């Protein structure tokens, strides 16, 4: 009987590959990232990496997913404002915990590599759905998913300020609630 399964996959090798990818992204950016450099940093053979990931974009997407597998919190559900405060606070913490160098590398890479852009959009759409599925029916999830992360990233990356409680309340009360309620107050 011939064994077609081969050796079982080594999970510690997967982690080493993904962590090496993230470190190199932060240090060198997406354009300078190479499978050869990831292999050298992780101690894995290039063939091992190519067996797991079809190309650099797939490798980077897997590394990003490995870094942030967070699940949005449960929401109180009795008040849209309270739900939004919980969700935006969680989102702000998730984004703020990301290495700014990683965010910059991803943005630059997405602009120059359609494969990476497609992979990251897949991840972002999945994550947006996980967040907005928790919002009550009156809220337009699409608007939330576009506006809230954009403003949080702008605050953290461009402005360089934290997303403190005051900012979160401003984002919810002055921007999200009016948008989600279609301009109605209250």
Image: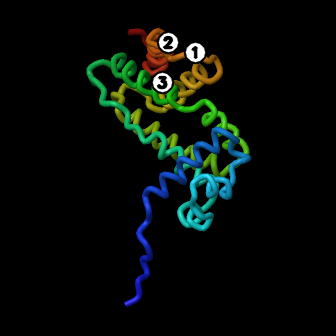
Q: Earlier in the sequence, mark 2 or mark 3?
A: 3
| Disc 3 crowd, CA 10 A, few/some/many (<14, 14-19, 20+) | many
Distance from the alpha carbon under mark 3 to that under mark 1: 11 Å
Q: Nearer the viewer, residue 36 or 97?
A: 36
Which quarter of the figure has residue 140? top left
Where is 123 relative to 143, above or below? Answer: below
Q: Residue sitting at 64 percent across and 33 percent down?
A: 101
Q: Which residue is mark 2?
A: 167
Where is 119 relative to 101, above or below? Answer: below
Residue 24 left/right relative to 65: right
Say the numbered circle drawn on residue 161.
1
**Residue 2 location in percent, x, y?**
41, 88
Cβ atoms under marks 2 and 3 closer than 8 Å: yes
Which quarter of the figure has residue 74? top left
Where is 45 relative to 183, above or below? Answer: below
Tell me the element at label 1. loop
Q: Which residue is mark 3?
A: 92
């Amino acid at each position: 009987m011939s064994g077609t399964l081969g050796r079982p996959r080594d999970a510690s090798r997967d982690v080493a590959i993904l962590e090496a990818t993230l470190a190199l992204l932060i240090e060198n950016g997406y354009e300078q990232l190479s499978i050869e450099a990831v292999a050298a940093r992780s101690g894995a053979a290039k063939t091992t990496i190519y067996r797991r990931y079809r190309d650099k974009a797939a490798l980077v997407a897997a590394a990003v997913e490995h870094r942030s597998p967070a699940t949005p919190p449960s929401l109180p559900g009795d008040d849209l404002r309270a739900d939004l405060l919980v969700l935006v606070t969680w989102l702000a913490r998730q984004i703020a915990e990301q290495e700014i160098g990683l965010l910059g590398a991803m943005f630059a890479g997405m602009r120059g590599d359609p494969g990476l852009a497609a992979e990251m959009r897949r991840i972002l759409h999945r994550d947006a759905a996980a967040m907005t599925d928790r919002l009550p029916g009156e809220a337009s999830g699409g608007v939330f998913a576009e506006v809230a992360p954009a403003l949080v990233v702008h605050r953290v990356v461009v402005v360089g300020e934290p997303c403190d409680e005051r900012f979160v309340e401003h984002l919810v009360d002055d921007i999200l609630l009016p948008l989600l309620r279609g301009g109605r107050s209250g």
